Image (spheres, rainbow, N blue to C red):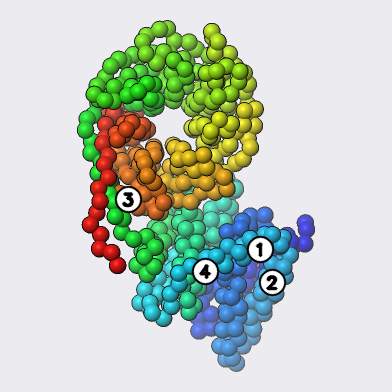
Amino acid sequence: MDVRDQLFNRVREDAESITQLTRGLNFPLAPYLDQTDLNALCDAVSLEPDQWTTDDLERILLLRDGLYDLRQNLRDKGDNPETEHSVDQVLGGLDRLYADFDRALRELERSELVEAQSHLTRLREGPRVSSAALQGEVQDLRAVATEVLTQAQITQRSIEINIFRVDHLNVNLEFLKNAKLNVKRLSASVFNIKLSLEQNVIFQGIFRFLNDGADRVLAELAALGRQFQKAYAQSKDFLAELSKLSETGGRFTRLVSAFLTRVFGDQPTPEMAIDLKQQAALSSLPILCGTLVRDKLVTLCGRDGTRLLLDTSTMRLVDQAKSGDTINDAVVFDDWVAAGTTEGLELFPSIGRVASERAPYQENVVAVAVMPWGALSEGEVITGSRDGTLRRWEKVANLSQVRSAKISRHIQKLKPRGKEQLLVASREELLLVDEDLEVLRRIPVNFMIKDMAVVDSDTLVVCGPGSVAHVNLGQGIYSRLIGATTTAEYAAVAVLADGTVCAGTEDGKLIALDFNSGEELGMVDLGFQVRGLITVDRRILAYGGAWNNSGRGKSIAFVTWQKRALQVEHR
């Protein structure tokens, strides 16, 4: 263990010892110290050294002054002879924590520390207001922050109980540790917001940074809760506490966002809306995928090998066929459609009814893409199987495999990134893969990716349960679009134009969002589960349908979209 890890482990041990000490004191701590604040501060510095990220370091740098103020406040108040010994114990613990914390920060890599400090400096250079002018709003936010911090402590105790019972419940210990880590990160962000409110100046950038971080952690906790519920139904107490924390935390982040908008006007009322109108609808077996095969012609595929050819200019069915194997994904490949089925890769003509061809390998292919790789002018078909295997296929007369590689445990979607790289959605990660099927980069997204759409060479939009996000492929980071509600099950996303995207949900909503602010610009209820979106001119073709329908149900809708200027009163 290097010096850095030793020092940060000492900081973590100091924080844990303070927490244990204050729980066992025989005098009321409240007149001298806010126990909730102390617990939150200890959460922020008690991460394992190898779990620290740049965001964690920035949060910790922000609360360094808070730790100093906490010590001074306790030193000034703790002069009661009856409680002097106990106060001294806590004060001694805080002094050790402060000294070890300061030494640990000095041991950080210079580049690591400079990067964090530079970012915080930039955040402080933007708009700011005096907290004295906002006493009412500040008081309300502080009260809700305390509520979140209290619930975070209750949730942590619930997690600790579950960890103690782990052998009895047969629960994945790593899962519980990740949950506890996320709760600590949420606690640190909320405590820093509360600390910032109590200072003389409120910085817009600092608030935005902290609130976005808290919002991301809440999304991760919600996803963890859903996973835990599926696997461990007997741990109802833990799930109940996690649900309460998500509820109070979500309310708090919404209040902070509204506070920022009201005080700084950083997200003014949009001057534009998008009118979404459903023009026509069709019924069929559930549709899982679709691709534009020629101008105005779209092929849609789905359950039991359903294949439909639609003319989007007339919104009418041109042809239909059925092969038997469910088609999970499809893409145009020269004059063919490459279809990933439950039995492998299949090629069928984009127009007409020539016999289809099958690849000589049986597996459940869930994602398909075409890349300009290999020696042939039409490029190659890339398939991704449910078990995480990528394969390259070329076609002269018959399909032949060029290369294969198992890159993950699961694959959901494939998308080209230019001519050289392939984007692979694998559960809660984005992988950038080269022509040799080697993973160049992994970008954690922290929610299950259901769909993605390319905006430009460096920008991607992804969606999943409770989240719509844009990913900076160049920097390898993502940030959630704040207008996306955390309760919606987003299943499909597409780019419209001029900084707008649309997302489809499992309960049948189609929602237009501003790409930069996340502001909701329009919505229409399609009345069926949306699984995918294709944009053609000023229309959106939405498809899906309920899987448990015994027969044909509503599964396809044509939606027009049009921008509309709003009458906005400018300040």
Marks 3/4: CA–CA distance = 29 Å
Residue at position x 29%, y 25% in the image: 312
Circles 3 and 1: CB distance less than 8 Å?
A: no
Q: Please name the residue that numbered disc 4 is placed on.
A: 125
Which amino acid, by three-letter code, is at mark 4? Glu
Does residue 105 appear to the left or right of 211 in the view shown? right
User: Mark 2 or mark 3, which has the lower sequence index?
Assistant: 2
Which amino acid, by three-letter code, is at mark 2? Asp
Residue at position x 60%, y 86% in the image: 75
- Badge 4 local density, few (<14 within 10 Å), some, or many (20+)? few
Q: Please name the residue that numbered disc 1 is placed on.
A: 114
Q: Position of residue 357 (x, y in %)?
A: 48, 10
Which amino acid, by three-letter code, is at mark 1? Val
Query: What kind of element bears circle 1?
Result: helix
Quadrant in which residue 19 is drawn: bottom right
Quadrant in which residue 420 is drawn: top right
User: Mark 4 or mark 2, which has the lower sequence index?
Assistant: 2
User: Mark 4 or mark 1, which has the lower sequence index?
Assistant: 1
Looking at the rendered image, the disc whose residue lies closer to the viewer, 4 or 2, is 4
